[in-house]
Amino acid sequence: MNNPLPIRLLALLLLCACNVFSHPMDANSYQQPFTEIKMLSTFLYAANGNMADGNRVVFDTQYSNDVDRYDAVKMTNPGENFGLLRQGYTLAVEARQPIANGDTLHYKMSNLQQQVYNLSIQVQFLSGVNALAELVDRFTNTRHFVSLSNTTNIPVAVTADPASKAANRFYLVFTGFAAGGALPVKFTAFTAQRLADKSAALQWHTEEELNVDHYDIERSEDGVRFKTIGSVKSTADILLKKVYNYKDITAIAGSTFYRIRSVDKDGKYEWSRIAGLQSEGFTTSIAAYPNPVNIPRLNLRLTAAVAGNYTVAIINTNGQTLYTSSFVVRNAEHVQTVPVSTLINGHYIVRVTGEDGKPMLQSIVIKK
């Protein structure tokens, strides 16, 4: 075969067979005229920071989705194992066709110990892929957004519960392709409000509902890991504007993030923007200006702030943290400038956290 890609893949297979996962290949190390290899690597790190195991997926049109000579069967380690399950085989490296809507990577793990691991998903040359990627955790019943342009780190707690060690606890699914038809709905507004009975009232407005089946309500305590807490059946059609309401009677007292996922009858879905609620009884307030943001920087004003160290993060509607930094507050009134020139137009959540660990939330819109 004249294409150089299989030769380079053999080198990757050798790396994986030798368990040399601690130095994932750097995208900048590839030189032309070699083809840029699209890959996704998943590494499991123990609580002490040491790599326990990992696997790798390579995507190219010359490969098939069947297990063949371009795949590497995993050898079982005496310690933790974290491989890929395909057609009854456990793989260390899987070579497969380019990512398509609905493609799923099934992980297989074994011999994990009680601790909090770090699952690090590292990507290479996938930023142009028109897809959404989510890691689904069957044990916690949560879905975690996975970036196709940057590394995603996900804490994984293994407890005394046998289900937390289940071999099939995780899978990664690719969805949300825009090709092949319009998205099922247009969200025009989404709000969240605390009520006197300590519940949360959610309301979202839609237009142009096309073949929508239902809406899933998702909640998160950190803006990253979301869990479905309820569902509302679609009652509108493409010609109507509609307002939907949902009451979260088990609302969390601390800072909370919500988002709505519309699911059509064919399984295609998309998310609303994220709406946030402050912790109950929070005294320090935060304001962002200008909002909408039409300049390269955002100003954050903290009022009645406690002196100390703070962090600020900007989170997009997919739950991905796009910016983070730290700063020091010395006075009750403090203004912090945050660069936003690299952010595209859209809705975001700004999260500011002090030394007490309680985040303050503020919705912003980038509109250049």
Image (cartoon, rainbow, N blue to C red):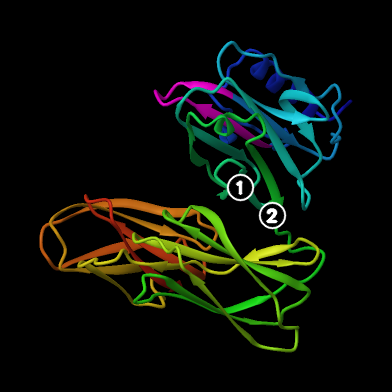
Splitting the image into 4 quarters, where does residue 20 fall? Answer: top right
Secondary structure, mark 2, is loop
Question: Which tag, 1 or 2, sits closer to the chain's start?
Answer: 2
Question: Measured along the vertical axis of the image, is residue 102 above or below residue 168?
Answer: below
Q: Nearer the viewer, residue 75 or 217?
A: 217
Question: Measured along the vertical axis of the image, is residue 50 above or below residue 345?
Answer: above
Q: Nearer the viewer, residue 32 or 241?
A: 241
Label 1–label 2 contact, CB within 8 A: yes
**Labelled disc at residue 104:** none
Q: Residues within 10 Å of mark 1 (few under 14, many from 20)?
A: many
CA separation in Å, label 1 and label 2: 8 Å
**Labelled disc at residue 148:** 1
Which residue is rendered at x = 89% and y = 25% of the image? 1
Estimate the x, y position of residue 302 in percent, counting from the top left. Answer: 21, 67
Q: Amino acid at mark 2?
A: Ala
Secondary structure, mark 1, is loop
* In this rendering, position of residue 30 left or right of residue 2: left
Q: Residue 234 in magenta?
A: no
Estimate the x, y position of residue 42 in percent, counting from the top left. Answer: 60, 32
Estimate the x, y position of residue 203 in percent, counting from the top left. Answer: 52, 78
Question: Measured along the vertical axis of the image, is residue 182 above or below residue 114?
Answer: below
Q: Nearer the viewer, residue 179 or 119?
A: 119
Q: Amino acid at mark 1?
A: Leu
Can the viewer see residue 240 in this picture?
yes
